Amino acid sequence: MTRIIFYSNLADKQTTLATLLQQALEKRHQVTILAENEKTASSTSDALWKSSAIGFIPNVLSSHALAPETPIVIDWQEKTLFQDDILINLTQQQLVSFSRFRELIELVSNDEDDKAAARQRYKFYRDRGYEIKHVG
């Protein structure tokens, strides 16, 4: 069963995302990040390449030829999923294919609309019997 973790009340999702990705890379996990749209996916990718003064977090968009071989892939369609290890949801949407992943991470900002959408997703997972860990 998919392990679900909610990180809530985040002032900066990008910082938390970079930290989680760095940890995942150190443990040799594969990560799919789901963004709202192609523009957000592209800006997230750019930010990760520039995420640290001493390094970067390598990634590609799902449309890139090397996506099947890259540990961190950013998608916006939920159609081109290449792995089933970790999924990080940056959207406010209920994901269709989350249960194929070993772990689902939900990042929730301190924005009221983001929180409201996250509450709906939380309820959806809980009502289906998923154990949910909450950080924040």
Image (tube, rainbow, N blue to C red):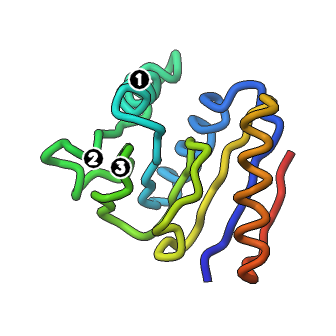
Residue 51 point in image, percent of width and height: 50, 23
CB within 8 Å, label 1 to label 2:
no
Label disc, if present, on residue 43 of the rendered structure: 1
> What kind of element bears circle 1?
helix
Q: Quadrant of residue 14?
A: top right
Mark 1 vs mark 3, foreground winner is 3
Residue 15 to residue 136: above or below: above
Mark 2 vs mark 3, foreground winner is 3
The quadrant in which the N terminus is found is bottom right
CB within 8 Å, label 2 to label 3:
yes
Amino acid carrying label 1: it is Ser
Amino acid carrying label 3: it is Gln
Label disc, if present, on residue 77 of the rendered structure: 3
Residue 43 point in image, percent of width and height: 41, 23
**What residue is at 38 percent from the left and 56 percent from the top?**
78
Foreground pick, 94 / 80: 94
> What kind of element bears circle 3?
loop
Label disc, if present, on residue 62 of the rendered structure: 2
> What kind of element bears circle 2?
loop
Residue 51 to residue 73: above or below: above
Q: Quadrant of residue 125?
A: bottom right
The answer to which of marks 2 and 3 sits earlier in the sequence is 2
What separation in Å lies between label 1 and label 3 (alpha carbons)?
Answer: 16 Å
Residue 38 point in image, percent of width and height: 34, 33
Foreground pick, 77 / 17: 77
**What residue is at 35 percent from the left and 66 percent from the top?**
83
